């Protein structure tokens, strides 16, 4: 399917998830939106992205530290290094394969970006979208400006993508890229089938379905992708597809 380029004005901030989705449509060599989301989150943990949202790196690591769900091992300064191998009576052993995060104390109130910098780097190096699903959604929803994103990709040696354009270019591009015929409407009854078709094609290509991607797909098919019927159908269909929690552990005999 040939996709029409979906342009976004540079004055509009985007979430990390939306950036990954749009960037994946033009980056070369090709990378999936999931792979790019991981790269953006790793950069966020390293303090390379000045994203804004409802979470900071300290709040995120605090959530991991206090969670009763599966999480990394924490090594509190001044205490013995935590065990990573547990032997069982039957001769097998359970081996922890996640990161070990060194923190200055048991009290997150005493933590800072400076004394937790090594822990941030360990998470960035070992980041896995599914294993860190406790905090992944809220990090992916942090927003970034076009200026900060462009500065980061230039520092990394990437080509500047074309989906985020200057306001004047955006206006001209919107005229040039406007469909020759009026956008077709999607009824509330047909919206779920349309979303499922988009979901199937996106997953088949190894990408992650998103609302931004749905709107791009709708425009490429000459449909109005901004209608509430499509967005609501997307929420209903994708609402139960969040990845499971926990990180697998290896066993040895």
Image (cartoon, helix red, strand yellow):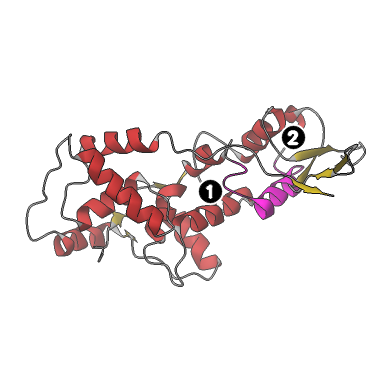
Task: Kindly identify which numbered label has been placed on residue 111.
Answer: 2
Q: How many marks?
A: 2
Q: Earlier in the sequence, mark 1 or mark 2?
A: 1
x, y percent for residue 87 = 89, 41
| SS of the residue under disc 2 | loop
Residue name at image x 34 percent, y 37 percent: 237
Q: Dot 2, crowdedness within 10 Å: few (<14), some or many (≥20)?
A: some
Task: Give the vertical position of 205 relative to 210 (above or below).
Answer: below
Task: Kindly identify which numbered label has been placed on residue 50.
Answer: 1
Task: Give the vertical position of 100 relative to 165 (above or below).
Answer: above
Q: Farthest residue toward the left?
A: 181
Query: Would you say residue 46 sits in the magenta stretch?
Result: no
Q: Is residue 249 visible?
A: yes
Q: Which residues are magenta?
A: 113-132
**Mark 1 touching mark 2, by CB under 8 A?**
no
Q: Quadrant of residue 133?
A: top right
Task: Kindly identify which numbered label has been placed on residue 6.
Answer: none
């Amino acid at each position: 399917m040939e996709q029409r380029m979906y342009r976004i004005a540079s004055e509009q901030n985007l979430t990390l998830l939306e950036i990954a989705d749009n960037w994946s449509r033009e980056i070369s060599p090709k990378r999936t939106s999931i792979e790019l989301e991981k790269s953006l989150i790793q950069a966020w943990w390293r303090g390379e992205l000045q994203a804004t949202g409802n979470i900071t790196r300290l709040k995120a690591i605090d959530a991991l530290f206090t969670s009763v769900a599966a999480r990394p091992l924490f090594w509190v300064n001044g205490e013995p290094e935590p065990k990573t191998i547990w032997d069982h009576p039957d001769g097998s052993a359970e081996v922890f394969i996640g990161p070990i995060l060194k923190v200055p104390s048991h009290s997150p109130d005493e933590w800072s970006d400076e004394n937790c910098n090594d822990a941030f780097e360990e998470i960035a190096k070992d980041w896995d979208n599914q294993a860190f699903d406790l905090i992944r959604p809220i990090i992916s929803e942090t927003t970034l400006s076009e200026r900060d994103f462009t500065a980061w990709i230039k520092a990394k040696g990437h080509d500047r993508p074309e989906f985020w354009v200057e306001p004047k270019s955006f206006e001209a591009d919107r005229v040039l890229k406007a469909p020759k015929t009026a956008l077709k409407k999607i009824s509330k009854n047909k919206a779920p089938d349309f979303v499922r078709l988009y979901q199937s094609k996106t997953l088949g290509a190894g990408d992650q379905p998103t609302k931004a991607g749905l709107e791009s797909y709708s425009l490429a098919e000459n449909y109005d992708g901004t209608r509430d019927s499509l967005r609501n159908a997307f929420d209903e269909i994708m609402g139960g597809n969040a990845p499971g929690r926990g990180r697998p552990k290896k066993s040895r005999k």
